[in-house]
Amino acid sequence: TRYAAERYDSGQRCDMEAGMAKLFASEVAMEIALNAVRIHGGYGYSTEYDAERYFRDAPLMIVGEGTNEIQRNVIAAQLVARGGI
């Protein structure tokens, strides 16, 4: 995230770095939300606890601002364009 911000501030393209940050954050958020529901057991589905809301909201991060599949395509295209592969 920091590297993407530094590239943005310097006027360079940062779509690959921003895509990497978004991809990582959304996948980790989903994994953590799922683990929270598992840890809380039946209470994890109860609206009285935050775990339920996180579990409900985490998939939206995967879809918002481009699905993770689109992010992977952007990252791959930029790696090729920059000569990284």
Image (tube, rainbow, N blue to C red):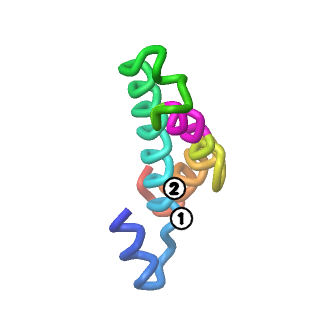
Residue 17 is left or right of residue 69, and the answer is left
Answer whether residue 37 is magenta in the image: no
Q: Secondary structure at mark 2?
A: helix
Q: Is residue 72 above or below residue 5?
A: above
Location of mark 1 (residue):
15
* Residue 58 in magenta stretch: yes
- 66 or 28: which is nearer to us? 28
- The numbered dot on residue 23 is none
Q: Determine the CA span between mark 2 and mark 1.
A: 6 Å
Q: Residue at x 49, y 44 (%)?
A: 26
Q: Residue furthest top?
A: 42
In this view, the residue in front, 59 or 85, is 59
Please provide percent x and percent y for residue 51.
Answer: 46, 33
State whether residue 38 is above or below residue 63.
Answer: above
Q: Position of residue 46 (x, y in %)?
A: 54, 25
Above or below for 75 versus 55: below
State how many labels appear: 2
Residue 54 rendering spot, x and y as whole percentages = 50, 38
Residue at (41% x, 84% y) in the render: 10
Residue stretch rendered in magenta on the structure? 52-59
Q: Which residue is mark 2?
A: 19
Say what amino acid the circle numbered 1 marks: Asp
Image quadrant holding the N terminus, namely bottom left
Looking at the image, do the residues carrying marks 2 and 1 touch, with CB atoms under 8 Å apart? yes
